[in-house]
Amino acid sequence: MNVFTQKLSYGDGKDITIETGKLARQAHGSVVVSQGKLKLLATIVSNKDARDGVDFLPMSVDYQEKFAAGGRIPGGFLRREGRLSNAEILVCRIVDRTLRPLFPSDYHSETQVMIQLISADSEVMPDALVGLAASAALTITDIPFEGPVSALRVGRINGEWLINPYASQMADSDVDLMVAGTAADINMVEGEMNGISEKEMVEALKFAHTHIKNDCAAQLALCDQMGGRKTPREYNHETNSDELKKQVMDATYQKYYDAAKTPSVKEERAEKFKAIDNEYVDSLPEDTDDTKMTMIKRYLGKSKKEAVRNMMLDNKQRLDGRALNEVRQIWTEVDYLPSVHGSALFTRGETQSLTSVTLGSKLDQQMIDNYQEKSFSKFMLHYNFPSFSVGEARPNRGPGRREIGHGNLAERGLKRMIPDDFPYTLRIVSDILESNGSSSMATVCAGSMAMMDAGIQVKAGVSGIAMGMVADDKGRYAILSDILGDEDHLGDMDFKVVGNEDGIYACQMDMKVDGLSYDVLEEALMQAKEGRMHILNEMEKTISKPNKGLKDHAPQIEVMTIPKDKIGAVIGSGGKVIQEIQQETDAIVTIEEDGDFGIVEISGVGSGPIEAAKEWILGIITDPEVGTEYVGKIKSIVDFGAFVEILPGKEGLLHISEISWERLESMADVFEEGEEVKVKLIEFDERNGKLRLSRKVLLEKPEGYVERPPRERRDNNRNGGDRRGGRDNRGRDNRGRNNRK
């Protein structure tokens, strides 16, 4: 067994080892990346031949966090890892976006990238190492790959930039940025931050790139240990003809150019381009074979792409006639959905998002179960992209990786706007009703407005914009604000930025071209700022600040504290008391221990349920005071008196002798269960919680009344108690009834 290892360090004890030759040796490439106790296993397999009819790279990326890595057993009936979680899917997307641009465009073999967390470290965040692991596994193979590449995390604490901060450090970091690239260029950026400037963003990227270069050098050093990097395998997945390509370009380029130069909407433009395609195909001989037809279709696409890009570079004009920095027409509306807690409709050009806000209690939190622990999230943003939004008919299979990724980006852009003391669980749902570019940024805009409409006192409004770019080999480039779908598909950059005048709060960038300078990147960021401020100003014409209060049909929440030793009484045995409170008041009650106190959260629609539940809880935690008068409720009637609830969950005995100054021979027809009666507490035994009540002391004593001598009581030690004590044995004393659950 030949095992090779290569070490690298980020400083501060962050020593990393890349190892190959020990695990998964039948994979085309496999490495184990280790830091502390953390171990990631990355494997690569790529078939030798391409499937028939495939004209793209069919690469799948799967990242899975094994529960065993953290010493946990999965939940669920099967007790094994199931489908990938949203967090795992987001890591898959980071790896895919990092690797995919570095494969040759004509490489079409089925390729599988798998990364598994096989040992966890509570302080080492695995997503910061998966890009390094995947690239290292690829670099040691003969698979054609223009790497190495690496992806890492950038944080900032007290103005100091950090590479791959520990998990415990991230709470103090105002930046959480994933950056990927080769030794020469940055090709992927994604993250959130607390309102940093454009110049600070460029600083972060430069800082990250320095360490990315070291990661790439370490991977090449590992190859050197193994005898040098392998010669890329030979493949022939595309048949090409320079002569045929020239024929197609000569026949169609100018037509595509002229069509692109004439401003048009999405559907009209698609029809014009399709007509050019059909015209050329119809001109071909009927006996044109399939191989030649495949090449022609490919060259038609290349001709269109080159024509559109050159048109924009030549004329500084967009496909829809806009200037390079011009944002499409915007119209907005709030409170469009009267039954939801907040809503907004945001339309920009041919992209439209209908977004709703729903407020819930702590019970509505999303549980997140991973290899470390079960945790809960109070903020959810769900992004839906139905096929009708692009004029297509497809089965609805639920959210895919794209939907999860777009939703996560919008969530990152909005969550820092939520007040720090916001007590609600918040769900935002964005339904994309039309799409022609940048639907995730439309979600940000609609989400910001919907929260204001809901009366959430957000820190500030935010908007989002998608930037693009086209460039040629002559050094010409054009930065595009608010890109269309076609401009995204045909361009070299997709750069989404969320923010306001205070700075950037979230971003995502994918590069399709090498050699983007930091000066051009900063120019794109400044143009993005101009665009997002324009969009924000348009949004503010509809709603500029949050509504003063929540809507009448939205749930209200009140938080109260109770002594720690009273938590059990409020919950009750098996939760019976708290369940009764909720059933009787229509409020939702949750209790959470916090130091020496219990934090009680009461939610309900309108103030009535909340006040009723609050009064009930106050009654439970309040100790009765001797001499205090109460209006109680008859809970049960027995031969020797009645049990009266004077406070929620607290009952006392109103003895037959304490009901009236007149002697009562029986309890027949004296009271009815549920009847209210005014009583006074005359005795409270703190040892056992027994309460003695009197009604007669509140009544006027009859003239000439003679007090009878008290009857001699039985020995409590002999039979376990007096008459009230006898009820103790049946679980009906005050303490027992306080804890009826």
Image: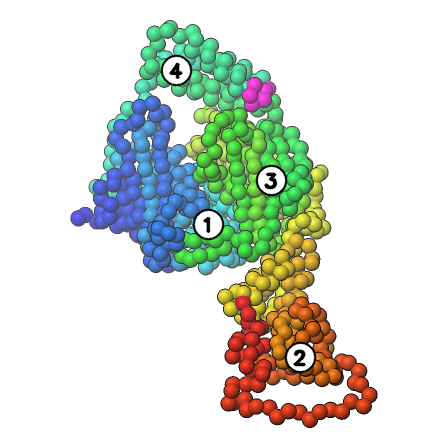
Which of labels 1 and 4 is toward the front? 4
Image mark for residue 355: 3
Magenta-highlighted residues: 263-268
On screen, residue 520 versus residue 345, left or right, reads left
The residue sitting at 37% across, 52% down in the picture is 77
Q: Examine the image and state in which quarter residue 735 appears.
A: bottom right
Image quadrant occupied by the C terminus: bottom right
Q: Examine the image and state in which quarter residue 594 appears.
A: bottom right
The residue sitting at 53% across, 53% down in the picture is 365
Q: Whole-percent x and y of residue 256? A: 50, 16
Which of labels 2 and 3 is toward the front? 2
In three-dimensional space, the C-alpha distance between marks 1 and 2, rounded to whole angstroms, equals 81 Å
**Closer-to-camera residue (635/326):** 635
Where is mark 2, residue-wise? 666
Quick check: 66 above or below 729?
Answer: above
Where is mark 1, residue-wise? 154
Q: Amino acid at mark 3?
A: Thr
Assess disc 4: are there few (<14), some (14-19) or many (≥20) residues with their C-alpha within 10 Å of its C-alpha. many
**Closer-to-camera residue (413/605):** 605
**Contact flag, marks 1 and 4 (Cβ < 8 Å):** no
Q: Amino acid at mark 4?
A: Ile
**Closer-to-camera residue (145/29):** 29
Q: Earlier in the sequence, mark 1 or mark 2?
A: 1
SS state under label 1: strand
Where is mark 4, residue-wise? 296
